[in-house]
Amino acid sequence: MKRAWAFSCILALSAILGGCGKDGSRNATQESGASGSQAPAQLGQAASGTPAASGAQGAPATITKAQLPGEAAETLRLIKAGGPFPFGEDGVLFRNSAGLLPQHPRGYYHAYTVRTPGSADRGQRRIVCGELRKQTSDCYYTEDYYASFKRIAQ
């Protein structure tokens, strides 16, 4: 009886630890702290290999609210309203450890999910906003999970 219990525990532990090296655990770690330093692409390059629109080459490129996908406009509306947000991870601290956004003290930036139609999970699109919560005057859009950013023009 003890052997069967021990074997079950070993199997469960193996399953848990076996998943730790997979991309899913990287995403969970990154989303909980939302650190741009662990983004899948190299610093200064988007996932496609093209130069990223981010702080590595100077100021991020700009995108107007009209150019954003409709889901991003909804996310901005929720940010201004203070929620409720569709995902528990929305509003988490974004550390900007890769330095792709303008430098500010820790705690300045927060990340929010931009829904991706047809995606079974949160997808790769986010909006990162600085300043006080419910403020959208210093926000950035990323469609490649923090590999590049575009400043959202007011």
Image (spheres, rainbow, N blue to C red):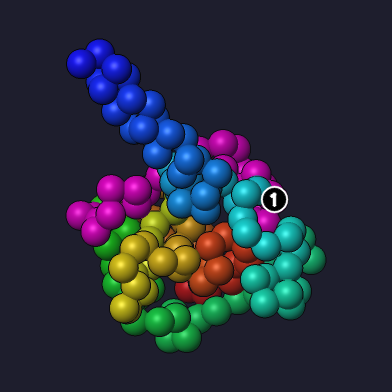
x, y percentage for residue 34? 50, 47
Residue 67, percent from left and from top: 47, 86
Relative to 89, residue 139 above or below: below
| Closest to the observer, 21 or 12 | 12
Q: Secondary structure at mark 1?
A: loop
Looking at the picture, tell me which residue is in the foreground, 61 or 39: 39
Please tell me whether residue 147 is drawn above or below residue 20 in the rendered image. Answer: below
Majority secondary structure in the magenta region: loop
Q: Per the image, is 86 magenta? A: yes
- On screen, residue 75 versus residue 86, left or right, reads right
Is residue 52 shown left or right of residue 124? right
According to the image, label 1 marks what residue? 99
Residue 125 appears in the figure: yes
Q: Which residues are magenta?
A: 83-109
- Asked if residue 75 lies left or right of residue 39, the reply is left
The residue lying toward the viewer, choosing from 113 and 59, is 113
Image point (31%, 68%), residue name: 120
Query: What residue is shown at x 67% (from left), y 77% (from top)?
Result: 48
Where on the picture, by quarter, is residue 100?
Answer: bottom right
Residue displayed at 60% across by 38% down: 105
In this rendering, the answer to whether 34 lies above or below 76 is above
* Residue at the (74%, 77%) spot, across then down: 50
Q: Position of residue 13 (x, y in %)?
A: 39, 30
The question of residue 81 being in magenta is answered with no
Side of 139 where 15 appears, left or right: left
The residue type indicated by label 1 comes to Gly
Residue 52 at x, y = what percent?
A: 70, 71
Pointer 1 local density, CA inside 10 Å: few below 14, some 14–19, many at least 20? some
Quadrant location of residue 49?
Answer: bottom right
Q: Residue furthest right?
A: 57
Q: Quadrant of the N terminus?
A: top left
